[in-house]
Image (cartoon, rainbow, N blue to C red):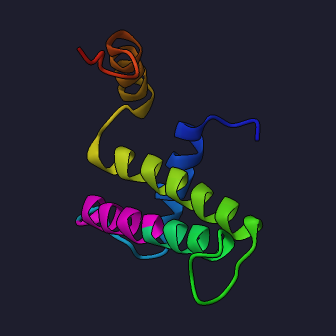
Amino acid sequence: MTESMPQVIAEIRERLRESGFPEEGAANRAVLALAEEAGEFVGAYRRWSGQARRTGSFDDVRAELADVVIISWLAAAELGIDLDAAIADKLKVMFERGWRDERA
């Protein structure tokens, strides 16, 4: 992929509008879709890891996780969040606070 994620998401947003999904309510649709995709990822993981009634492939896990990332970018765009900046800010906090609290 030679395009940046913001460019790809801009194209997805344009295609959604062309397909009849109006700007009004777009953030709500994206947030709900994110929850749905997260659930589908968990289901795929459960099937692949043997924790569900039926089995699934690792390719399914991979594809569903990609859906989560893509829709996360879309939700951020619809909400007016600069996800690159938000991720950079969050990573700074994570690296500054460390990984485990020291116990006495």
Q: Is residue 25 above or below residue 96?
A: below
Q: State the residue at coordinates (29%, 40%).
A: 80
Q: Is residue 85 above or below residue 23?
A: above
Does residue 71 appear in the picture of this structure?
yes
Quarter of the image holding residue 26? bottom left
Q: Position of residue 78 (x, y in %)?
A: 33, 50
Q: State the residue at coordinates (60%, 65%).
A: 64
- In which quadrant will I find the C terminus? top left
Q: State the residue at coordinates (44%, 64%).
A: 38
31 sits to left or right of 10: left
Q: Position of residue 99 (x, y in %)?
A: 40, 22
Q: Is residue 78 above or below residue 24?
A: above
Query: Observer-nearest residue: 57 or 11?
Result: 57
Residue reaching furthest to the top: 96
Q: State the residue at coordinates (52%, 48%).
A: 9
- Look at the image and say whether residue 81 sits in the magenta stretch: no
Query: Observer-nearest residue: 79 or 68?
Result: 68
Q: Position of residue 86 (x, y in %)?
A: 35, 28
84 sits to left or right of 86: right
Query: Observer-nearest residue: 9 or 47?
Result: 47
Write down the region rendered in magenta. Answer: 25-38
Q: Is residue 47 above or below residue 5?
A: below
- Look at the image and say whether residue 29 sits in the magenta stretch: yes
Q: Main secondary structure of the magenta part?
A: helix
Q: Position of residue 1 (x, y in %)?
A: 76, 41
Q: How many marks?
A: 0
Query: Observer-nearest residue: 43 or 19?
Result: 43
Does residue 17 appear in the picture of this structure?
no
